[in-house]
Amino acid sequence: MTDQTPDQIPTDQPLAEQAQAASEQTAADQAAATSDTPPDRLSTNPKSPFFIPEHLQRGVGIVFNGVEKTNVDEYCISEGWVKMAVGRTLDRKGNPMTITLKGKVEPYYRDTAAAAEDA
């Protein structure tokens, strides 16, 4: 190898700039992907592995079988189901009782819809 220290090794600026541009583009693509479509599966329960607070803070609305639902606790688009709270009933651990319904699930971001209405 060479006897150069890391400070003496010449750096290829264009390559470094390309790597930085690629990482910025990847971050921008991820931000655009997150800003456009809600995730495939999302839960409001903090104990769930599908709990993503960043998405919930934006406000996610659910249209289930053509009807907007406001009591959805968890959904999965690919499997086509939602878990909905049943009244004010609680289980023995204090969690809301839920039922699972199957059908067409269409999530959307409420803040995007509000911005579209203002325009």
Image (cartoon, rainbow, N blue to C red):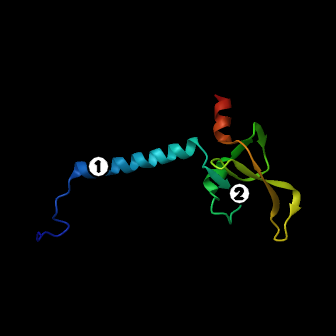
Q: Is residue 83 above or below residue 114?
A: below
- Residue under the point 45% across and 45% down: 28
Q: Helix or strand or loop: what does disc 1 sit on?
A: helix
The type of residue carrying mark 1 is Glu
**Relative depth, front residue between 21 and 78:** 78
Q: Which mark is residue 17?
A: 1
Amino acid bearing label 2? Thr
The residue singled out by tag 2 in the image is 44
* Residue at 23 percent of width and 51 percent of height: 13
> Which quarter of the rendered picture does the N terminus lie within?
bottom left
Q: Is residue 91 above or below residue 35?
A: below
Q: CA distance from mark 1 to mark 2?
A: 41 Å
| Quarter of image, res 61 | top right
Where residue 66 sits in the image (x, y, percent)?
A: 75, 36
Could you tell whether 33 is left or right of 78 in the image? Answer: left
Give the residue displayed 71% in from the left and 61% down from the top.
45
**Circle 2 sits in a helix, a strand or a loop, which is it?**
loop
Indicate the position of residue 98 as horizontal and vertical percent values: 80, 58
Q: Give the foreground label among 1 and 2.
A: 2
Against 107, residue 116 (above or below) is above
In-image side of 59 versus 13 (left or right): right
Q: Which residue is farthest top?
A: 119
